[in-house]
Image (spheres, rainbow, N blue to C red):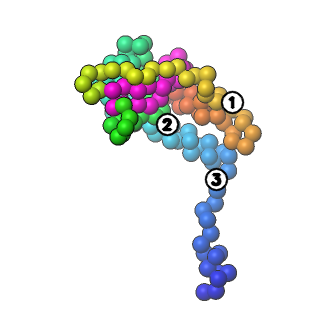
Amino acid sequence: MDDRNSAMCEREPRQLNVQQQNASVERSLRAEASYWRRHGVPPALASVGVERGIQWERSIVVELGIDFPGMPSIFGRLVTQDQRFIAFEIDTTDEIRVEQWEDITSAQNFNEHNRGTGVGRGALALRVLRELSA
């Protein structure tokens, strides 16, 4: 096989268009939220959330890390029943200690029509919240 044919066979994967990228992000958010709905969030997060008014059956987890080196025991982001985005960090090493519980709603992209990127991640997360809470 000459160099030209070799190059044709080793093409880079086709880049996704904006709609495909948005669909991929939405699927990822839905998968994460659905997983934690089915299996339940870690008990420490569940109790801290309830103490702060989270109704878990009407809220979703969009990112959750557990026991990563150099990080608090539990960290991530959730969307509440009131469509508020919360970033959290909880250390459970000796006792449950909340290191961060911050409303980050104002930093989310809720735009449905971003030039070049399509739908904002915040708007996609709200779609998933509405779908799973229906």
Q: Position of residue 108 (x, y in %)?
A: 61, 28
Secondary structure beneath label 1: loop
User: Quick check: 59 left or right of 10?
Assistant: left
Task: Work out whether 110 lies above or below 26.
Answer: above
Q: What distance separates the C-alpha of mark 3 from that of mark 2?
A: 19 Å
The residue that mark 1 highlights is 111
Nearer to us of marks 2 and 1 is 1
Identify residue for label 2. 30
The amino acid type, in three-letter code, at marker 2 is Arg
Considering the whole magenta stretch, tell me its main secondary structure: strand
Q: Is residue 127 magenta?
A: no
Q: In the image, residue 34 lies at what x, y percent?
A: 43, 34
Residue span colored magenta: 73-91
The extreme front residue here reads: 70
State the residue at coordinates (64%, 86%). Answer: 2
Instruction: Please tell me which residue is depicted at 44% across the width and 25% down the height of the picture.
Output: 88
Residue contact at pointers 3 and 1, CB within 8 angstroms: no
Left/right placement of residue 76 relative to residue 73 reads right
User: Which of disc 2 and disc 3 is earlier in sequence?
Assistant: 3
Mark 2 neighbour density, 10 Å: few (under 14) some (14–19) many (20 or more): many
Residue found 72% across the figure and 36% down from its top: 114
Mark 3 closeness class: few <14, some 14–19, many ≥20 residues within 10 Å: few
Label 3: which secondary element: loop
Res 12 → quadrant: bottom right
Label located before the other in sequence (3 or 1):
3
Amino acid at circle 1: Asn
